[in-house]
Every structure is written in C-alpha cells, then in structure tokens.
Image (spheres, helix red, strand yellow):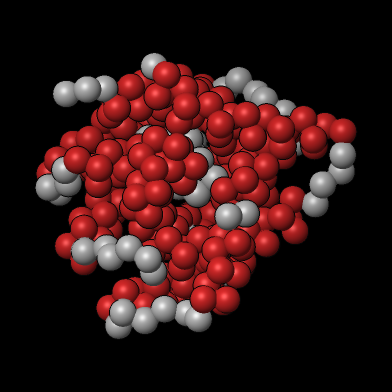
C-alpha cells in the first residue's frame, strides 16, 4: 500500500493546494488553462517523446485501445441515457462523461507509479485520447448545432498535435534541438503536471456538489466499468507489462476536466458535468487506489 499512496497521494496533495488557494485568492483559471494547452503540454509531449523511441506497433495498440474504450463506455452510457429517458442536453452531457482525465490526473499518477518511462507511455495515451476528446467530445457538446466540422478544426488548433508530430520526426531522423533550446523546452515541460493539478483543484473549489442518480451512474461507468473494460481491451490488444499497466491506469481515472469546460462553453448541462468531474475525482481516491494495488502487487 505504500507504493500506492506514493503514486496517488501527491496528486491529491497538489490538487488540495489548488483548492485551498482558490478559496482565498481570486485566480484566472482560463489563463492557467491556456498556458497549459498552448505551452506546457506541447513542451511535455515533445520533451518526453523525442527522447525515447516509441514503437509504431505500440502506438497503434494504444490508439485502437482508446477507440475501443470509448465505444464500450459509450454504448453503456447510451443505453443508460435511453433507459433514464434523458432530455437532449442531459443525454449529450451524459455521453461526454466517457472521456477519462488523461492529463491533469493520468500523467502525474502514471509518473509516480511507473517512473519516467511510464510517463512517456502515458503521454502517448494522452495524445491518442485527446484527439478524440477534443473532436468527439465537442461534437457531443454541440451536436444539436451540427458542429462536427468546427470540432475537427478545433483539434487542429491544438499545438500538442504538432509537438507530437515533431517528436516523432525527431525520433525517426535521430535529430534533436540544440542543447540550449531543448533545455528551455524541458524547463517549460516541468510546469505541465503541477499546473494541471492546480487547475483541477481550482475547478473543484468552484463546484457546488450535488447528489443525483444520473451523476452517480456516470461515476459508476467511469470508475468501476472503466478499469474492467480497460483490462479486457489491453489483453485483447496484446498489451503486456508496463504498456498494459499504463493504459489501464490512464483509462481508470476520473472524467476529463475539459468536459466541464465544454459544458459551460456550449451550455450543455454545465452543472451536471462539473459535478461528475468533481465526484469522480473525489471517488477516484478509492477506485484508482484499488486499480494501482492490483497493478503494482508482486506477481
């Protein structure tokens, strides 16, 4: 249990610091989010991936695994939404809870659990998942407006995609930035994880927790069924060892904070999405600890 606490404990400590800070200081979370999206995360992607060779076969397995995860959870959520007779807005928001928090939560937990190599693999999963989150997620948020073209264009506006492509080129061509430039990228990348956790804490401080059947159904699908689906899919995709552990851990986290942001921006049940994000994060202290216990236990 010591290794489990060492992996997940720091995430909650830094998030709690962001929560407490927001209670006493007015913070501009939009500015922090913009810095993270357009500077810190791209730097982390490039710094991590350009230094370690990622096999194309593993990248393909991760991409396929993420797609299968979203299909599996999406089908369950769709069936539950129809059974519950949800209206259009709640239905769309309910489907948006299929997306796990691969950045704010997944990256630091994978780093503390599996080290720098685990962090690199977690970044690959994040890139695969983020593409879908920022296209399919936005589509669900504004599907009544037929905004799929806008959603896809928005994905192309994220520099993380280009940082990923640049890192792959650097790998394949055995080329690297001049030392002074690369060190600048490395320094910048080190801000990504703490800033992401601070943003998560700020979001929690700004959310009024509610109790609702739909909220807890979404929590159940994300935190209970999510790890089960991930373990099955990892086995079917032929993932083993560390690569499987990272995938399962990334797919076991709480709902992505970005879904709450989209809920506000597109006016799609913002209170519901903010609550699901908050509740899944709080409950993940137990659920992800159990997942980590099984992943880290001696065989």
Q: Quadrant of the N terminus?
A: top left
> Residue 34, how many percent across, how many down?
68, 62
In the foreground, 119 or 214: 119
**For residue 51, above or below residue 123:** below
Q: Quadrant of residue 169?
A: bottom left
In the foreground, 124 or 207: 124
Residue 135 appears anywhere in the view:
no
The mark tally for this picture is 0
Q: Residue at x 21, y 64 (%)?
A: 55
Q: Residue at x 67, y 45 (%)?
A: 199
> Residue 54, how many percent across, how many down?
27, 63
Q: Residue at x 39, y 35 (%)?
A: 113
In-image side of 211 versus 121 (left or right): right
Most distant residue in the top direction: 1
In-image side of 61 versus 126 (left or right): left
In-image side of 165 versus 201 (left or right): left
Q: Quadrant of the C terminus?
A: top left
In-image side of 30 versus 124 (left or right): right
Residue 258 appears anywhere in the view:
yes
**For residue 163, above or below residue 134:** below
Q: Quadrant of residue 176?
A: bottom left
> Residue 46, how many percent across, how many down?
46, 68
> Residue 177, how many percent across, how many down?
47, 79
In the foreground, 64 or 239: 239
Most distant residue in the front direction: 179
In the foreground, 259 or 61: 61
Q: Residue at x 68, y 29 (%)?
A: 16
């Amino acid at each position: 249990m010591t290794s489990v606490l060492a992996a997940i404990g720091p995430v909650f400590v830094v998030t709690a610091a962001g929560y407490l800070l927001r209670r006493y200081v007015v913070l501009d979370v939009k500015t922090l989010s913009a810095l993270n999206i357009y500077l810190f995360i791209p730097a982390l992607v490039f710094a991590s991936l350009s230094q370690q060779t990622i096999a194309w076969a593993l990248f393909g397995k991760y991409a396929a695994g993420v797609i299968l995860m979203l299909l599996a959870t999406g089908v369950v959520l769709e069936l539950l939404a129809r059974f519950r007779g949800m209206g259009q807005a709640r239905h769309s928001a309910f489907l948006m809870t299929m997306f796990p928090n691969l950045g704010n939560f997944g990256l630091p937990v994978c780093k503390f659990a599996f080290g720098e190599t685990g962090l690199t693999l977690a970044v690959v999963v994040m890139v695969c998942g983020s593409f879908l989150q920022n296209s399919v997620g936005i589509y669900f948020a504004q599907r009544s407006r037929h905004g799929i073209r806008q959603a896809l264009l928005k994905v192309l506006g994220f520099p993380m995609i280009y940082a990923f492509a640049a890192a792959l080129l650097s790998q394949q061509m055995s080329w690297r930035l001049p030392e002074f430039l690369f060190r600048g990228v490395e320094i910048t990348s080190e801000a990504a994880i703490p800033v992401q956790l601070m943003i998560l804490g700020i979001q929690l401080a700004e959310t009024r927790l509610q109790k609702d059947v739909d909220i807890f159904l979404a929590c159940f699908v994300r935190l209970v069924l999510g790890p089960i689906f991930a373990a099955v899919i990892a086995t079917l995709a032929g993932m083993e060892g560390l690569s499987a552990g990272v995938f399962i851990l990334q797919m076991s986290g709480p709902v992505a904070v970005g879904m709450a942001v989209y809920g506000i921006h597109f006016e799609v049940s913002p209170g519901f999405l903010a609550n699901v994000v908050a509740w899944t994060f709080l409950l993940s202290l137990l659920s992800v600890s159990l997942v980590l216990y099984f992943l880290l236990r001696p065989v």
